[in-house]
Image (cartoon, coloured by chain):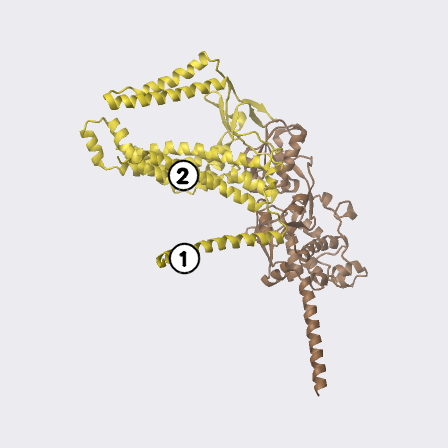
Amino acid sequence: MNNKIKRYIPQILTLLFVIGVIGFFTLNAQVNMDNRGIDFGFGFLKQESSFDVQFSLIEYSGSHSYARAYLVGLLNTLLVSFISIIFCTILGVIIGVSRLSSNFLIRNSAAWYVEFFRNIPLLLQIFFWYYAALRALPLPEKAAPWFGVTYMTIKGYYIPSFIWNNLDIFLYSILAVIICILFISTYAKKLRETSGKQIPLFFISIGLLIVLPALSFLIGGVSLDFEIPVLKKLSQTSYTYEGGIGLPPELIALVLALSLYTSTFVAECVRAGIQGVSKGQKEAAASVGLTPNQILKLVIMPQALRIIIPPTTNQYLNLTKNSSLAAAIAYPDLVLVFAGTALMQTGKAIEIVSITMLTYLSISLAIAALMNWYNKKIEIKEK
Amino acid sequence: MFNVIRKLTSFAAMVAVLFVFTTETMAAKKSKTLKNTQKKGFVRCGVSQGLPGFSNADASGNWTGIDVDVCRAVAAAVLGDANKVKFTPLSAKERFTALTSGEIDILSRNTTWTLSRDADIGLTFVGVNFYDGQGFMVRKSSGITSTSQFKNGISACTNIGTTTELNMRDFFNSRGISYEPVAFEKADEVVAAYDAGRCDTYTTDKSGLAAQRTKMKNPDEHIVLPETISKEPLGPVVRQGDAVWEDIVRWSLNTMIEAEEYGITSANADSMKTSDNPAIKRLVGAEGEMGAAFGLDNDWNLRIIKQVGNYGESYKRNIADTGILPDRGPNQLWTKGGILYVPPAR
């Protein structure tokens, strides 16, 4: 009994302290807001926002609500984070593996790359790509086409947009491919475990991935048209492109900076993971007659991934949070649109900043949950 | 003997009560902001991050501009020295929060007076020190001479968190033109982006366009289009809830404008004390008790005029002589064809 009390008293005191601190800040904010005649409430979210946003994934104009503007900003944040996470992972793995290469040139270039990009502040890198590198791009009328139909200009990267007919049938064919591959891989595993026979799963999957969607084009009536951007004259000296999709230079600069910067950290995680697997594992695998490919796939990578995933998750979280630096270069992310323009137009500082903080918290927790699930999946299962 | 003592004590008590009473009414009249300002010894003033003519710091950190002069006038009135101002450069996004949270006491930062700002967010606008309107700047070589030549797909650079963003939408929408808004947080970033060709037009208040034009690589390559698409009355703002401080800032500005109306300048202010016109005498503290209501002495307005000058002097020094807007346009006195008209100081 006595022990129990001893154990609980500090915990209760700590809890009371935390409640007290939160209560003090809430009360303080309330009193000050009352004194200054500021109302607290989330009713503003339903009001018309009456400002436009440069770049949006969903339909949006100033006649929509502030809630919709929030969604626009959130989606733009998720977009830039998603693209950057993919790029930084690909780049990070390549650089990380290169750091362990036996080739002097590859090994040292990778090391230089890592040291260079991770030691310059991210904001500076964003400014560099936006104000220096992308400003050197040609004006729309002077841009030479890349791959024939895309144009990289100071106003953005203009690419053709797809116009699908019967897109649903195409998507069904993709779904069918995924289900087939799942079935075949379960069957292949059973076959291997019972009879030791191997079937070329990889080639079958690729084959399916080509054949079924192709059939949907031939029989299913799916077809694809392109809308190619066309140069349009705005005045005697200024031009723009019409049609197709225009990726704003702000997005490009941000993706470049975020993925190059974060890829250096991912590369170090990858290198650490591979070096963390002891040499004996590789030698043992070779001595039981596995090929070098099998050694990498079946012995090294499963063990390395367990070391790589947790710190890489951190890097993904950092990248997502760092994407809020977008505000510095006018990319309309959550901070610029919602905690920027919307905050200014409504004056609801406390409400908007708390919503924004909660949003970043939720995104980070969601990414962490996903990565933890993956980590659980690949960790050693004791039998 | 006892009688005398009793009389003395009752007299002393009465004096004490009276004293307490009077000091209390004085203190009640003195505002909290005023008291804090006098205790600190400087006026805390929020300005822009650099807009020539309005609020701009030179290489050695001296702030000049007509917005700056409003804060200097308040400092001269309440502290006796126009230099006792601490300037805080703020972005459009930060400005109101800085004021409502108490980081600054006056926001004098080319801020448009609108209903929702005045009513909603705990602010009070005290007057107008510049009548402005939103316009567009384009490159001369584009051949555009009017906003009617704007076409679908035009990209427009501007600042976030300003009325500009809203007016721009109203303007393009009412004309059915699709446009790409590119909104930056800092004015310098907007100018750099427009200058590099990221945008076809740059839109903000016309005074701002004129001022920023002077910062461009080659100012002569750009023109400001003649159309004005909005009303932008710019003026100083204070926190809601301190009526006396609000009055001090309002009447510091009004004093500058009225001084010009009566021809009182920083040079002749002292000699105006002997003027025959009672209105002039009130403005230089030689007649009436014009400061008492604010809890200030009687020379508060004389100090403003002597140390900062009248509105015309401030305009000439900051905006006309620097080549930003030599023509005063609507910012001329009502007696000379403009719309500057302030209530009488009496």
Instruction: Kindly identify the amino acid type of the residue bearing the numbered disc 2.
Output: Ala
What residue is at 54 percent from the left and 52 percent from the top? A26
Numbered mark located on residue B344 in the image: none
**Quadrant of the rendered image containing residue A309:** top left
Give the answer, above or below, for where A204 lies relative to B299.
Answer: above
Residue B98 image position (x, y, % from top left): 58, 50
Of the chain colours in the picture, the one used for chain A is yellow
**Chain at numbered mark 2:** A
Secondary structure of residue under mark 2: helix
Q: Nearer the viewer, residue A245 or A154?
A: A245
* Percent coordinates x, y for residue A304 in the rendering: 29, 35
Q: Could you give the CA–CA distance between mark 1 and mark 2, rounded to whole angstroms? A: 33 Å
At 39% across and 22% down in the image, what residue appears?
A178
Outermost residue, bottom direction? B1
In the drawing, does residue B261 fall left or right of residue A71?
right
Q: Which mark is residue A9?
A: 1
Q: Nearer the viewer, residue B77 or A332?
A: A332
- In the picture, measured across the screen, residue A287 lies left or right of residue A369, that is left
Chain letter for mark 1: A
Quadrant of the image occupied by residue A106:
top left
Residue A226 % position (x, y) = 50, 19
Query: What secondary structure is found at the residue carrying circle 1?
Result: helix
Q: Which residue is mark 2?
A: A368
Q: Is residue B62 visible?
A: no
Image height check: is B65 above or below A57? Answer: below
Chain B tint as drawn:
brown
As shown in the figure, which amino acid type bears the numbered disc 1?
A: Ile
Q: Looking at this view, is A18 or A152 the one in front?
A: A18
* Residue A194, quarter of the rendered image: top left
Q: How many marks?
A: 2
Image quarter where the C terminus of chain B lies is bottom right
Work out which quarter of the rendered image holds the N terminus of chain B and state it.
bottom right
